[in-house]
Image (cartoon, rainbow, N blue to C red):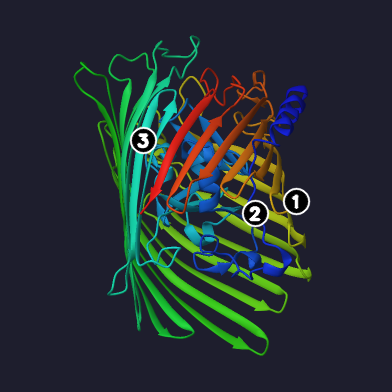
Amino acid sequence: MQRLILATSAVALVIPTQTHAQQSPSRDDVTVLRPLVVSTPLRRETALVRSTSSVTVIDEEELRTSAAADLPSLLKRYAGVSIIGYGGQGSASNVSLRGMSAGQTLVLVNGIRTASATSGTSSIFNIPLASIERIEIAKGPHSAQYGADAIGGVVNIITRQGGQCADGRSACASITTGVTYPWGGYVSGDVRGRSEGGVDYSVGGSILGTRGYDFTTPLAWGHEPDDDGFLQGSLNFSLAKEFDWGRLYADGLFARGRSQYDDTFPSSNEVDTDTFAGKAGARLKHSDSWSSTVELSSSLDSSTNFRDGVPGDSRFDTKRYGIFASTEKTFETGDARHVVTGGAEAYREQVDTTVDFDVTSRGLEAVFGQYSVEYGALTIDSGLRYDHNEQFGGATTYNIGASFEIVPDLVARASYGTGFRAPTFNDLYYPGYSNPNLKPETSRSYELGVNWRPTDSTTLDVAFYQTWLSDAIASNPPTYIPFNVARAKVTGVEASLSHEFGDRWSGKASIDYRSPRNEDNGRYIPYRDRFKATAELGFAATDSLDLTARLLYGAARHADAANTVKLPDYVTVDFAANYTFDAQSSLKFSVENLFDEQYSTVTNYRAPGRTFNLSFTRVF
């Protein structure tokens, strides 16, 4: 705690010359903004203020001012989000929500599943920040909307979309180039706009490379005393056109990365990772109150492990093809507004691997329905879904939630839901370490929350939640064969506060406390965050210079099932300065982990130390 106090004091000393805040308009110039709309929680557009569950939105402004070099570094500072990293940029990293595992957290790109069907986790390190427009994080169970794996919640990464440029032009472009330390560099660019024919388009790409650093300590299994570098290229696109009868659209993201890592096996210490998610769809407008959507989607998660000069490799590829269809009807009765949604979804997962699995593909089908009603200050959302998995049969999930505006700008919410996680191909079929008789993991959760905006400058959000997990898949030495037996309970509290102190100063703070326990033995689940606190201060030094300082405190947590080993607590401070020369040119300088804190989120794997970034952006 003493280290946290010292670091907080350091940030406070830095603020007068090294912080950032958005400039607030004066009272006479207040602009009424449209309510923020999100699509992730209910799988359709809804106003964030009406949400019956906790939702965090990371917008373009936060992406612009962040000191983060990659997606894991960006996500780790948000309440309810945990990151476990096996090194720095390009290393394997897992994201989880509210104390659940990475496999119990659903990661989407533009609404498309991205996880490997063998490991059950997504390659979030291979999704470049340059391709992202915003991120929506819906916390709590959402299996009634998305099916398997959405026990802890959903992270939906939305890539850059097309449309008219912010300054009103029909076409615009930008290019960003930068250098980093540990030594590396990158360049990214994009073109977006609206054609004369009314087609909204966006195309972007990026290339980055870094020599990295030695990810492991000498005590790590497989330690090799060398730097672990990363090289990546990516391409993203979006197309859409509005018609009198509806809308046609398509989008996609492809990224290929080569990561170096340490391994005692002589056959591999590098991995090539391919990530793809794409869809094409149509939204049919039957009337002003009735519409239908049909989407075709495809995704790929491919990893090939090898070592230069050594013949052979190990390969784990997942291909997923799907179709989604829904229809949505809105109607009113008196002062109540009703929305009824129904639909079906089907996708097929196929694995191609050098490991000899008994089964290499499976089909999954689902039907679902949702009902929402808005009656004055009251909103109620409900959902029911049935999933059929070719390997283990059916699973039914549901949720119900309500929000109520007690007084203007004070909204209380409550929700209850169930979820499930499907066993992976590794769980079921990995030779010598699998169990084909596994059942899906199941959960039930509730949340109580309140969102209060006492002034136009201040917002407070608090949530209390509990999740019970049953039939959790576990394995023990010496066989490590998985089985359904474990029970877990996670109790947590999240609180986030933001405030604008004036035209130039702003601040944010959050706390994230949880108790993730194995109910079979009463011990804490290893590698799960138990307490996290963040603070951010910003200062618009001039009309051209924005400065931001951010602090993250991570408390000690257990690193083994017996709770005899702990990873120590840590404090990191980030700093970013954004300078705008004119409407076309800007410069960014940022430092992650300013005081070079040495810490780990996995035993014997070094988290990134002090990292510098200098970039220049030109808009055309």
Residue 131: x percent and y percent? 39, 48
Q: Which mark is residue 23?
A: 2
The answer to which image quadrant residue 78 occupies is top right
Q: Residue at x 52, y 25 (%)?
A: 608
Q: CA distance from mark 2 to mark 1?
A: 10 Å
Question: In the shown orientation, is residue 467 left or right of residue 323?
Answer: right
Q: Residue at x 63, y 89 (%)?
A: 333
Sooner in the amino-acid sequence: mark 2 or mark 3: 2
Quarter placement of the C terminus: bottom left
**Label 1's element?**
loop
| Residue that badge 3 annotates | 186
Q: Judge the density around disc 2: few (<14), some (14-19), many (≥20) Cα neighbours within 10 Å.
A: some
Residue 453: x percent and y percent? 75, 61
Which is nearer the eye, 564 or 183? 183
Quarter placement of the N terminus: top right
Q: CA distance from mark 2 to mark 3?
A: 30 Å
**Label 3's element?**
strand
Sooner in the amino-acid sequence: mark 2 or mark 1: 2
| Residue that badge 1 annotates | 501
Residue 99 versus residue 184 in the image, above or below: below
Which is nearer the eye, 288 or 379? 288
Q: Is residue 264 visible?
A: yes
Residue 263: x percent and y percent? 37, 17
Q: Amino acid at mark 3?
A: Tyr
Q: Amino acid at mark 1?
A: Phe
Tally of numbered discs: 3
Question: In the shown orientation, is residue 351 left or right of residue 334?
Answer: left
Residue 372 versus residue 163 in the image, above or below: below
Of circles 3 and 1, which is in front?
Answer: 1
Q: Amino acid at mark 2?
A: Gln
Q: Judge the density around disc 1: few (<14), some (14-19), many (≥20) Cα neighbours within 10 Å.
A: some
